[in-house]
Amino acid sequence: MLVFLYPLMQMSRETVLSSFTLSGRIARVVMVLMLVAFSLSAVAAQDSDDADDAVAIFNEAQALHEKGKLAEAIALYEKAINALPEFPEAEYQRASALQSLGKNDEAEKGFRRAVELKPDWTLAMTSLGSLLVKRGNFAEAEPILIKALETEPQNPTALTALVELRLTTKASKTVLQDLLTKVSSLTSKANPTAALWLAKAALESALGKLEQAKASLTNTLSLDPNNRSAMFQLADIALVEGDLQRANSLAAVLERSGQNKDELYLLRANILAGEGKFEDALKQLDAITKPTAVALSLRSQIVANSSQNPADLEKQLETDAMNVQLLGRLCNLYRKDDPQKALAYCRRANAIEPTNVSHAVGYGAALVQAKQYDAAVNLLRNILQKVPDNRTAHANLATALFQLDRYAEAKPEFEWLTAKEPTLAGPYYFLAIAHDHLAEYMDAMANYQSYLRLADPVANKLDIEKINLRLPQLQKLIKEGKGKKN
């Protein structure tokens, strides 16, 4: 007798519900068959023909369910329930089929009835708790999922649903770390599901463990190469790290499938905002059919970021002192004109969102503008350990080291910049000066020449004149064989 038990749950970026493994399904099939037998023995007083009919109808419904004929399967499940009113397995399967059809109101009633009939059945509890999380009913879902996990501590579906609940309700770091420990225990065992790796990555991202999160997402994609939730998470991490190129690449892959359009609009809006294209970002947000709190927050952030009047932003901050978007914008606006003020705003933004690399990078840039070079070097080096490809951090670290006359240390930073953006003139100029100070005259000459080739003759007129005055002396030193040889 073939039994088709597992519910067909659709997973979104915010929903990290676990899929059952094949072995898990087989085990649950056996369990349901046992439970069906138990249910029948419990109603032995009822007419045996009715019970036999209910089981036969249930099995026929299962076969249709497995073939994807959900409406027909639902009709037969209902017929089985009419024949045997206390039939939790039929209630559960009917609810699963209804959920697959998007009829969540009816599915919820079915899962509730299954739990009512079998209060300790973890499969039914898990499905009910997971659906309640999906519907945003966190207060009721929490005790149900906790009970399921107390009964079955290594229940991956209940655990991933609880992860989503904790992340959405912004649980404390202690709570998230405890969940991460439990999820990590399951991923360390044989055959962890893609959904478990996805849940692990979501927790790691929330805890600021971005490198670990990227590794977990790599494992997710190795099991499920087309997992859109994993790609969205990777794109979110790229945005936090300031890697807009990587975020754009992932958005292009996601766009080709044409699904999750609202999420894709939001991702595109974030990328465009990061590029300073605020009007284009707002157009993407306008295209979202059902704006979420995250989308509305981004709109407010863009409005703040597009403002060029610090006084207006400071006035808004008086009534919203913890608004990290306003603090970040003021950090940027005051960086040149009032570095000390910029520092204060950058420090506050970084304190509120310590895992947001952009705030830390802004703080480092403000330290450079305030000529607090030693502090900037320490902070920026710490940042680059976490996000080694952040161009802004490299540029500011190079500047700070250069201003401290630490040319040997500044040199590799400028070399990194020239390698990443070979058509940008500025880094060649400072790299040439660093080589010049280190008596590496051949390298200095080569980089001066690169700068002259790329520099704007009007905007960079003074620097070009300085170089032209230096080149004859440099050529003489090289001709005389002076300077260090690399």
Image (tube, grey):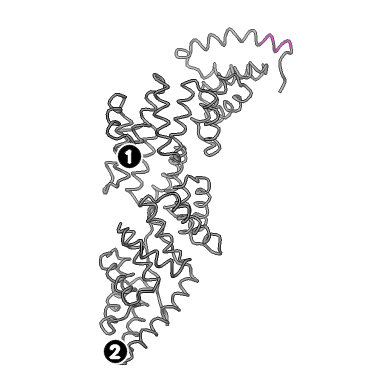
* Count of numbered badges drawn on the protein: 2
Label 1: element kind: helix
Give the image location of residue 464, x and y in percent.
53, 12
Are discs 1 and 2 less than 8 Å apart at CB? Answer: no
Tell me the residue at 46%/64% (across/down).
156
Magenta region: which residues? 475-480
Give the image location of residue 125, x and y in percent.
36, 69
Amino acid under disc 2: Asp
Instruction: Decide: is 50 above or below 392.
Output: below
Q: Nearer the viewer, residue 232 or 293?
A: 293
Tell me the residue at 30%/70% (across/down).
112
Location of mark 2 (residue): 50
Location of mark 1 (residue): 298
Which quadrant is home to the C terminus?
A: top right
Structural crowding at the residue carrying mark 2, measured as other residues with C-alpha within 10 Å and reported as few (<14), some (14–19) or many (≥20):
some
**Mark 1 or mark 2, which has the lower sequence index?**
2
Label 2: element kind: helix
